[in-house]
Image (cartoon, rainbow, N blue to C red):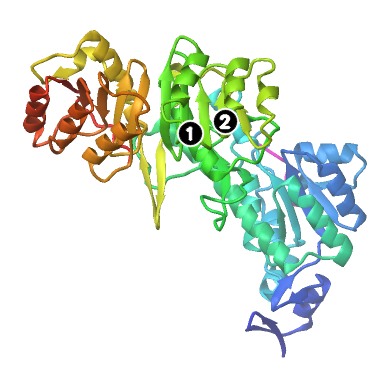
Amino acid sequence: MNGFRNGGRTRLYTGSRFGRCIHEYAHLVRGGIQLSQIKRAIISVSDKSGIVDFAKELSSLGVEIISTGGTYKLLKENGLPVTEVSDVTGFPEMLDGRVKTLHPKVHAGILARRDVPEHMAAIKEKGIEPIDMVVINLYPFKQTVLKEGVSFEDIVENIDIGGPSMIRAAAKNYESVAVVTGPEQYPEILAQLKDKGELSLELHQKLMAEAFVVTANYDAMIASRMYGRFCEGFPASFPIPLEKVEDLRYGENPNQKAAFYKDPFTPGISVANAELLDHGKQLSYNNILDLDKALDICMDFEKPTAVVMKHTNPCGLASDDNIYDAFMTAYNVDPLSAFGCVICLNRNCTVEVAKEISQHFVEAVICPGYEEGAIEIMEVKKNIRLLRTNAPIGPAYRHREYKMKKVQGGMLVQTDEDVVIDPANLKVVTNRAPTEEEIHSLLFAWKLAKHVTSNAVVYVRGERAVGIGAGQMSRVDSAKIATMKANEPTEGCVMASDAFFPFRDGVDEAANAGVTAIIQPGGSIRDQEVIDAANEHGMAMVFTGCRVFRH
């Protein structure tokens, strides 16, 4: 009786037939795990980058190559000895290529465990040879979806079936089968094969893990697209198709690791879709957060508007007839806090604006584009990051999507805030109604308050921020901070609050600051107390009926 040890388990077999199977396939034992030499590979790729050179190297190392369709044709045209998969299966491709590799002679060759004699005997009896490497990348589903004017039929036809099946099969049998899912993996694989004649267990494990990431993301892309087309509400499981943009230098702090991912199906204006110019340091985790928030604010405004962002809260915002005046006003709302800020402009950055920006310590700028000469002026600052959206920024170009926050052990998902206030629907609750000028400023203040961390209180004059109170545990403290942070007298300003006033003290504080009108959601059990306070101070107050709280 012969014994074969695998990871502490002993499989028993008798007879020379099993012994010949084990010997024939040259199993190599590493740390109790069976690894096979790469004798036979199946190659079927949509992305053919580097595949000819990779296949030539495999062939020169004595690897037999099986292939399908366009890949087979390409390899054949380049003089490689290659066997078509239909010659292996004895069954032709059918249904316009939908059925090619879905066959026992393929899948049994991939799935047979080399450390299970019964498996090896079974495939030998059926005339099936093992497949030691699977080189697959999938139908271009994402690229098809993103094509302009693509039909739904074309999208469905680019849902790969055989590819994911082979990848999953090879990944499941990773101890003996190398699963290769991208051109970026080719160099390391070839280096090991040339150096050692085999692949290490560690590389098999790494390839397996990367393969399941590929199939998981592929399925997530399909599920996300189909659910959005045919279903409403939140799915039972939430598929998130994300692709890595890059590893970041670190996270919020240097001791944390971080990476940036993008959703390939989110269209329109975003930091993920923006062009990062070749200047300055790599974008940091915190830069990306601030750029995203600043861009989000600018998307709410049609007039030339500038946002100055610091630590995910605006420290300056202004709209004007031109982007230079908007920027100068926004920056001077709180120039002390603006040190090390991120700036968003909803118009092209002019030479005049660039000159002003270059006078300050600014982390990053994002805007639709840059006038000739503007980039060169700002590049004097060697570390500034410059991004352009290459598309207009404004309400007409906003794309609404789910908002997500990771919590320990789970994820919170909500629809995007999409509150548009019609001035005609504002509810005047005080004895004095706001003037037209006040209403104009109140609506501007409301747009700003939507983007300030709660409890949010903002003071506005015309179309510019004057004082911003953010992120406090009590609303009255936010009102005090808005007064304290103001860089000009607050007399005659209007005030916006993102949620109702639970007590009258916030209104009293605003009155002390000289505020003349307030916009807020209403809905407190003490609304009448708050209204009475406004009346006592001769202030106008309107209710919007909706909250724009940002936790």
Name the N-terminal-most of marks 2 and 1. 1
Q: What segment carries the magenta color?
A: 89-94
Marking on residue 338:
1
Prevalent SS, magenta region:
loop
Which residue appears at 62% of the width and 34% of the height? 385
Q: Is residue 393 left or right of residue 275?
A: left
Mark 2 residue element: loop
Give the x, y percent position of residue 395.
42, 19
Quarter of the image for the N terminus: give it. bottom right
Which residue is label 2 attached to? 360
* CB within 8 Å, label 2 to label 1: yes
Q: Is residue 395 left or right of residue 426?
A: right
Where residue 260 sits, quadrant-wise, is top right
Residue 404 vs 177, above or below: the answer is: above
Which residue appears at 58% of the width and 19% of the height? 349
Quarter of the image for the C terminus: give it. top left
Q: Is residue 266 visible?
A: no
Which residue appears at 9% of the width and 28% of the height? 533
Give the x, y percent position of residue 367.
56, 23
Q: Amino acid at mark 2?
A: His
196 in the magenta segment: no
Which residue appears at 54% of the width and 39% of the height? 287
Mark 1 residue element: loop
Quick one: which residue is furthest to the bottom in this view?
Answer: 1
C-alpha distance separating marks 2 and 1: 9 Å
Q: Amino acid at mark 1?
A: Ala
Residue 386 vs 196, above or below: the answer is: above
Q: Is residue 304 left or right of residue 484?
A: right
Residue sitting nearer the eye, 220 or 466: 466
Q: Is residue 245 visible?
A: yes
